[in-house]
Amino acid sequence: MTVQRMDNVAIVVEDLEGAIAFFTELGLVLDGRARIEGPWADRTVGLDGVRSDIAVMRTPDGHGGLELTKYHAPAVVGPDPGAVPPNTRGMHRVMFAVTDIDDVVARLGKHGAELVGDLVRYEDSYRLCYLRGPEGIIVALAEQLG
């Protein structure tokens, strides 16, 4: 048996509404929301007393997705993601292909996104950048040239 597809990547956030607004501005579409709780959730993720809200965001082509998760219980743990550099072990970044990178960077800036480094040109192929978005999530953008 082989993998059929990748459905989504889950990202834990504190401000679910802010994360939804950010990824909507990027061009993702809210596909659904749900409250997750109960014994099945506890057993699935290996935690006791899980109570969370999720929002599933899809790319316009319908093939990629993010599951944004806000835990109400148990409490969120871990380092401040806003202070974690791009070379930290674990999930590095989420990358999106865009058509007008300058416009996207400007629009996401209105939602608090900041460039991690610079917007650069890679040969005659791409313009690329890393942005730090909501909850410190690093979002990479790539605009194909030509």
Image (cartoon, rainbow, N blue to C red):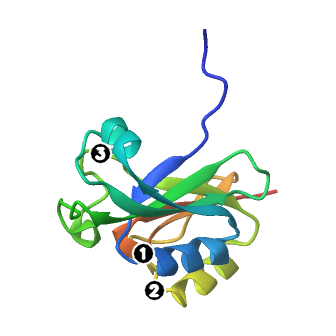
Q: Residue at x 79, y 52 (%)?
A: 61
Q: Quadrant of residue 7?
A: top right
Looking at the image, which residue sits at the far top? 1
**Residue 21: x and y, percent?**
58, 80
Real-space Cα distance between discs 1 and 3? 17 Å
| Residue 129 placement (x, y as % from top left) | 52, 65
Q: Along the line of sight, which residue is nearer the eye, 78 or 39? A: 39
Q: Mark 3 Cα within 10 Å, few/some/many (few <14, many 20+)?
A: few
Label 3 element class: loop
The mark nearer the N terminus, 2 or 3, is 3
The local secondary structure at tag 1 comes to: helix
**Residue 64: mark in rendering:** none
Disc on the earlier residue, 1 or 2:
2
Q: Is 81 placed left or right of 113 in the picture?
A: left
**In this figure, which residue is indicated by the disc labeled 1?**
134
Left or right placement of residue 41 versus residue 58 in this view? left
Marks 2 and 3, how far apart in space? 23 Å
Q: Which residue is mark 3?
A: 90
Query: Which corner quadrant holds the C terminus?
Result: bottom right
Q: In the image, is 38 to the left or to the right of 94?
A: left
Q: Are marks 1 and 3 in contact (CB under 8 Å)?
A: no
Quadrant including the N terminus: top right
- Amino acid type at circle 2 is Gly
Query: Residue at label 2?
Result: 112
Three-letter amino acid code of the residue under disc 3: Gly
Amino acid at dot 1: Pro
Label 1, label 2: how far apart the Cα atoms are: 7 Å
